[in-house]
Amino acid sequence: MELAKAASTLVNEVLLIRKGEDVLIWGDTACDEAVVKATASAVLVAGATPTIVMFQTKANPMEEPPKPLAAAMMNADVTIEYAMQYLLYTKAQVEALNKRNRAYICLTGCDTEGMVRAIGMVNYKKMIQLGDELAEMTGKADEIRITSPAGTDFTGKIGGRPVENYGSTADKRKYIMLGGQTGWACVEETQKGTLAFDGNMWPPDEIKANIRTPIKLQVAKGIIKEISGGVEANILKRWMASFNDSNMYRIAHICYGYNPGSRITGNIAEVERVFGVIQVGWGTQGPLIRPDLGGKPGWRAAAHCDGIMLNPTVYLDGEIVEKDGKYVHPKLAQIVKEMGIVQ
């Protein structure tokens, strides 16, 4: 019952599915088929036509989809993704959204429990309001500084770049992600310092939520120069080196996480939205990250990796807006209170 409620929220309140629309839902063999079927049922009840495509799990995210799925993308009004090895930023997905789809949502790896917690049981309207306020506040700042107990001390210039609430609704965005994340791309060459990840990292699969020793990245002019830590850091080093692609070492984006239903799990898309975290991605800088480029990516790399830092402190032009994972700026703290969250 709870999954049905969450699927209904997704279809009717987030994607705003219309009667008569063709809705394509896809997953790979690693995803939770229960959420795929529940979503299809909610689409049907909404008066639209659901079509499900399942395919073999790819070795890495962002590998091009099978040709039948790519063709289906180009014939859908709305597309919904649950694949663990996500197709976000692939040529097929980007072209379909730019030329045909009204909206696309990436719910990579979202399982039954996660969907119930992070969609069905949250105050979605207030969560979107918090994300919008973070976007406005950050977009007005010149510089951000992030520190954390694990060792992060990182700065970058925002430089008027667009700051986006990725988890908004289909009347405001075409690219949609699970609610609870606002992000942007700092001016690349201004990014410097240490990033220390202690919450989660993916890919590679060997790490996920098993970080025992913080993974530290030394960054200069937006480029990862050194990776240090323990066993997990060595896994990351080998994985990144295996691509022989210099773009894999470029910092792509920074995001706030603020979904009160998200938990530290093996699903990076959920962990990115854990309330109070900061997420940093490197590798491909996709069009979702740089909407100012008119639907084109900032650059492409062989893959994309995301890391999560817990209990961060965030300064915007020297003013603390988040301290140890708690939103302390008065505007943000008031919305958090209205969400029913005790920080």
Image (cartoon, grey):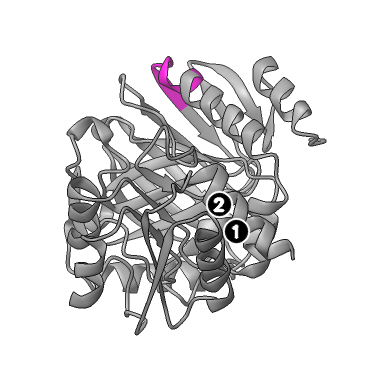
Q: In this orientation, does residue 198 appear?
A: no
Q: Are marks 1 and 2 in contact (CB under 8 Å)?
A: yes
- Compared with residue 71, is residue 18 higher up or lower down, i.e. above or below? above
**Numbered circle sitting on residue 10:** 2
| Residue type pointed to by label 1 | Ala
> Which residue shows up at 26% across the image and 56% down it?
89
Along the viewing direction, whichever of 240 and 63 lies nearer the viewer: 63
Which segment is the magenta one?
A: 137-144
Q: What residue type is labelled 2?
A: Leu
Can the viewer see residue 293 in this picture?
Answer: yes
For the N terminus, the image quarter is bottom right
Whole-percent x and y of residue 323?
Answer: 67, 30
| Image position, residue 20 (x, y; %) | 39, 53
Taking depth in this image into account, of 105 and 241 the one nearest to the observer is: 105
Is-magenta flag for residue 210?
no
Residue at 50% x, 73% y is 231
- Where, quadrant-wise, is the C terminus in this rendering? top right
Residue located beneath label 1 in the image: 7
